[in-house]
Image: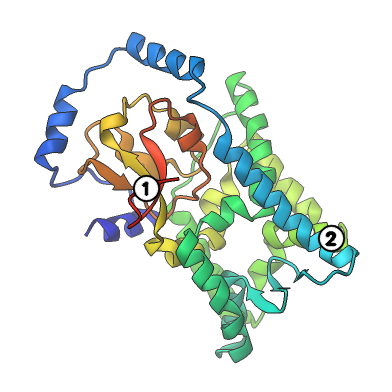
Amino acid sequence: MRSFERLRVMFGAAPQRPQVIAPEVQQVHKLKRMTKADFEALKQHARDHELVNHKWRNRRWVVLIAVNLLFTLSFWLDIQILEGSLTASRFVGFHLIDLNSALQVMLAHKHIIVNLFIGTATVFVLWVVLGGRSFCSWVCPYHLVAEWFEWLHLRLAAKKLVSDHEFHRGTRTVFWVVFSLLAVVTGYTVFETISPTGILSRALIYGPSLALGWVLLLLVFEVVYSRRAWCRYVCPIGLTYGMVGAVSPVRVQYRLEHCFHEGDCRKVCLVPHVLDVVIKGRAADLKTPIGPDCTRCGLCVDVCPSGALVFDVKGLNRLL
């Protein structure tokens, strides 16, 4: 039932308070009392003992840059290791096709293309294991660029030069349906034409094009008007991979007993609704896996001063 609730939230529904809370969890909630001074002391302790760091963010940046550079080097040096782009590629002979792109193509052609279906199998299994939205934060080049521009947005917002305008999260689900219908009606993969993920991937490999102007406009919009708007409210790729990775054994796990509810994790999260469970009184269990809309970026794990958020592999009983 809770898995269904997490999927519902991914499609845009507001997180709900749990109806049933385990007795031991109620006891933990009752015992927790912390003042603002306690919060500050906890954060200072974390800084002094280097508990707050950028370990997972740095690892993620290295992986993301390495994957995209491998595409570029394979093309320019003709070494044929990772050929193509993120939309469709071949890794040492294995065909890899982006799941959302494959869906768009099959909708446009109005039938299942066998070769395309085969090419998605490896990718499907990979992201079922690693967690679908891991693609967003560990592979997508637009995610990295938008993350850097987000820093500029936050600096300007702190000086009250800009403000963040939020949209309903269900907007992304609407766009997913709209792009799918456009593919069926027009026979053309409309989304692939405007996808900053595909545009940046092709630009890195084959050279820049005028389409980069569209990417720049998106980034400017996110800086001056709506923080991370494309990833949060428009891009259907995240929704497609979120559905695929809903049962992934690799996830971020929340441990209530370690949490002091200081809220830094929600401030850095791209999709803060997935961390609704960290709000005091919202946890129904002592240990809770974060929902399928989580990108597994690790920012919350890095910033948590008490170790309440950790990477976990289901069934292995060990933390990463």
Q: Is residue 267 left or right of residue 91?
A: left
Q: Is residue 4 left or right of residue 10?
A: left
Q: Is residue 59 left or right of residue 257?
A: right
Quadrant housing residue 40: top left
Give residue 250's position: percent from left, percent from top: 43, 55
Disc 1 marks a residue whose amino acid type is Arg
Q: Is residue 177 above or below residue 270?
A: below
Q: Identify the secondary structure beneath mark 1.
A: strand
Q: In which quadrant will I find the C terminus?
A: top left
Toward the right, the furthest residue is 77
Rounded to the nearest angstrom, the CA distance separating label 2 from label 1 is: 37 Å
Disc 2 marks a residue whose amino acid type is Leu
Name the residue at 46% across, 37% down: 301
Report the residue marked by disc 2. 73
Q: Is residue 145 left or right of residue 170?
A: right
Quadrant housing residue 234: bottom right
Give residue 52's position: percent from left, percent from top: 50, 26
Report the residue marked by disc 1. 318
